[in-house]
């Protein structure tokens, strides 16, 4: 069963001019009340910052409103949250005969 309402945990944080705390760096999906991310990274040992007020969909660099400084999304968390398999950024350049 896929989690539907995940928050964000990130390696860094920044504050916008309005005083809103937002994620930066590498972001992970995090379920509130859990001590680890969806992909299994422990929050305290990895020193991840929690953002319970930021939804997972809002931290996506392509479409999210809180993703101004997000540089990377955890691929395992993205897969667990339902990222489509066809959205891979690579293409085959030399196919086999």
Image (cartoon, grey):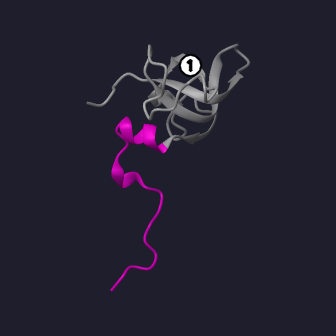
Residue 53 x/y as whole percent: 52, 15
Badge 1 local density, few (<14 within 10 Å), some, or many (20+)?
some
Q: Pick whichever, 48 or 22, lies toward us.
A: 48
- Which residue is drawn at the image coordinates 74% and 18% (left, top)? 17
Residue 49 sits inside the magenta stretch: no
Secondary structure, magenta segment, majority class:
loop
Residue 66 x/y as whole percent: 57, 27
- Which residue is drawn at the image coordinates 45% and 32% (left, top)? 40
| Quarter occupied by the N terminus | top left
For residue 24, side relative to residue 42 (left or right): right
Give the extent of the magenta segment: 75-97
- Which residue is drawn at the image coordinates 55% and 28% (left, top)? 65
Residue 44 x/y as whole percent: 59, 22
Which residue is most to the left? 1
Residue 95 sits inside the magenta stretch: yes
Indicate the secondary structure of the residue bearing disc 1.
Answer: strand
In this figure, which residue is indicated by the disc labeled 1? 51
Q: Pick whichever, 53 or 33, lies toward us.
A: 33
Which residue is most to the right? 17
For residue 47, side relative to residue 56 (left or right): right
Q: Pick whichever, 71 or 12, lies toward us.
A: 12
- Which residue is drawn at the image coordinates 44% and 16% (left, top)? 32
């Amino acid at each position: 069963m896929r989690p539907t309402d995940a928050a964000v945990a990130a390696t860094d944080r920044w504050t916008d001019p309005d005083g809103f705390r937002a994620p930066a760096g590498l972001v992970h999906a995090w379920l509130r009340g859990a001590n680890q991310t969806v992909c299994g990274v422990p929050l305290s040992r990895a020193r991840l910052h929690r953002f319970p007020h930021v939804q997972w969909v809002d931290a996506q660099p392509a479409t999210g409103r809180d993703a101004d400084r997000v540089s990377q999304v955890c691929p395992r968390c993205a897969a667990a949250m339902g990222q489509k398999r066809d959205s891979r950024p690579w293409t085959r350049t030399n196919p086999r005969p």
